[in-house]
Amino acid sequence: MGRVLAIDIGGTKLAAALVDADGSAARSATRPTPRTEVMAALAGLIGEVVGDGPAPLAVGIGCAGPINVADGTVSPVNMPSWRGFPLRDEVRELTGAPAVLAGDAQCFALGEHWLGSGRGSSALLGIVVSTGIGGGLVIDGAPLLGPTGNAGHVGHMTIDPYGELCECGGRGCVERYASGPNLARWALANGWKAPDGEPADARTLAAGAARGEPVPVAAFERGARALAGMIASTAAAVEVTRVVIGGGVSAAGRVLFEPLDRALDEVAGLAFVRAVEVQPTTLGVRAALAGAARLAWDHHATTR
């Protein structure tokens, strides 16, 4: 029957896999994302995964954004050597297979819908809480990409119009309150100090919150309330029925999810908003690659 090639491109890691129709990976590999010559590294990775075998039936690409699915270009914030880079066409030429592109967080949502915590959901919001905050929507089994491919950019929804300026140029964005670096930034500004020899990052902060330290607990409660406002607003607009949260910050576990549940109870009003189920990822770092594979299989089914 053949296989598709799934590619996941992020600021720190490149990953690729040959994937069967049931979602199982026949062969996979990863390598660090270089600061320059990213395409050369990606070509080497693809060669390692595909080898001397037949060309894949299709290629699904999940990439950090911003992206433009209309012309197949990407301009990832953490990859300065790619600005308006024609990624889809480059991969198509390299592999000899049709290629389809989406954002990495959209692929995360699609992967969770196919094989993870989002199975069976008719309207899913996937959220990646990490260095930044990304998101993706899967409605009736299909990713909602929008005209340029940037739908679901929930990290830059405004939850406080009088709030802090965000790196994106907006004000009061969720990312400014709930991303890993911003959780740690707020905690440091409010008197927290990382234990000797440990980095002052979200992982160390989560360990402090798990021990009940007041400032780390308050940082996660503040971040969780921002996430809750975003989830409730998205549910009111799109009527999502399930939310799956992944990314490095989600590994904080109960110190994130318990205040998030409480905050949702406080901010959600309408019955269909209150009914939203929030769950952690079950696929973890494999979710975006699974979603890229699903993109490829769907593209193959509609073009063959």
Image: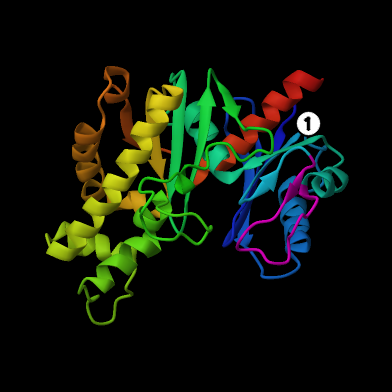
Which residue is at the front of the view, 157 or 160?
A: 160
Q: Is residue 245 magenta?
A: no
The answer to whether residue 81 is magenta is yes
Quadrant where the C terminus is found in the figure = top right
Instruction: In this rendered view, identify the residue nearer to me: 54 or 106.
Output: 106
Q: Residue at x 26, y 67 (%)?
A: 187
Query: Does residue 281 appear in this view?
Result: no
Q: What range is drawn magenta here?
A: 71-87
Mark 1 surroundings within 10 Å by alpha-carbon count, few (fewer than 14), some (14 through 19), many (20 or more): many
Furthest toward the bottom, the residue is 196
Q: Is residue 258 left or right of residue 114?
A: left
Q: Is residue 141 above or below residue 154?
A: above
Residue 96 is situated, as x and y percent measured from the top left of the image, at 87, 40
Residue at image mark 1? 57
Residue 86 rendering spot, x and y as whole percentages:
80, 50
On screen, 261 above or below 204?
A: above
| In-front residue for pair 282/74 | 74
Q: Position of residue 221 (x, y in %)?
A: 22, 51
- The residue positioned 57% from the left and 62% from the top of the image is 12
Q: Residue at x 47, y 33 (%)?
A: 112
The answer to whether 28 appears left or right of 227 in the picture is right
